Amino acid sequence: MFALIARGGRKFVGMSALASAASLPFFVPLSAAFICLTVFFATVFRDPPRKIGNGIVSPADGTVREVTPEKGFVSIYLALRNVHVTRAPFDATVVKAVRIRGKHKPAFSKSTPSNERVEIDLSTAIGDVSIVQMTGAIARRIVPYIREGQPLAKGAKLSLIRFGSRVDIRLPPDQVQILVQKGQRLYAGRTCIAEVRDGPMD
């Protein structure tokens, strides 16, 4: 089971489980509360295996909150129920991965550009791509798995965003055709969000 928990979330699950076991002989209701907390952490920080899809795949699980095809822009809102491990949309090289400190407003609001975030610039076969991962009112930290200069295969894990959050991706608009619509449910590494205009990017 522990292997299915995202790196960066395992300590929360482990500490809560240990607290439940430690409190059991002394106070059963407290132990039960820690069991519930352990289940909650295990759900929020789950990292299930994924079969990588065709085309340019979604970098995150969640719901499309905004899409602007003429700008190659897709914004994804991640609720607590979603998997919070983000993934590379295609083969790429990490040019930049920078953490910017900021506020913690709700991830679905229009003011989230001022939130704490990690900005990732990727070099790809179709040009430069940017992915911005933002914290929300509950999410307080993004745990990056990548480093500058690192090559990435499509579907490779980028980070863990703890709790609710938002992920924006900007693709070269002259190179791609956006396929998703506002309100659509997406799965990281699996759902195709766009295709290269000259043919599928598999």
Image (cartoon, rainbow, N blue to C red):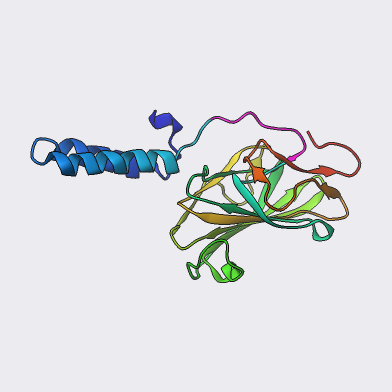
Q: Is residue 24 above or below residue 110?
A: above
Query: Residue sitting at 9 percent across and 35 percent down?
Result: 25
Q: Is residue 55 above or below residue 132?
A: above
**Majority secondary structure of the magenta segment?**
loop
- Compared across the picture, whether 96 is left or right of 139 comes to right
Q: Quadrant of residue 61?
A: top right
| Quarter occupied by the C terminus | top right
Whether residue 74 is visible: yes
| Quarter occupied by the N terminus | top left
Residue 198 in the image: x percent, y percent?
91, 41
Q: Is residue 54 magenta?
A: yes
Q: Which residues are magenta?
A: 49-56
Residue 64 in the image: x percent, y percent?
66, 52
Front-most of residues 79 and 144: 79
Front-most of residues 150 and 24: 24
Query: Residue sitting at 82 percent across and 42 percent down?
Result: 195
Residue 27 in the image: x percent, y percent?
11, 41
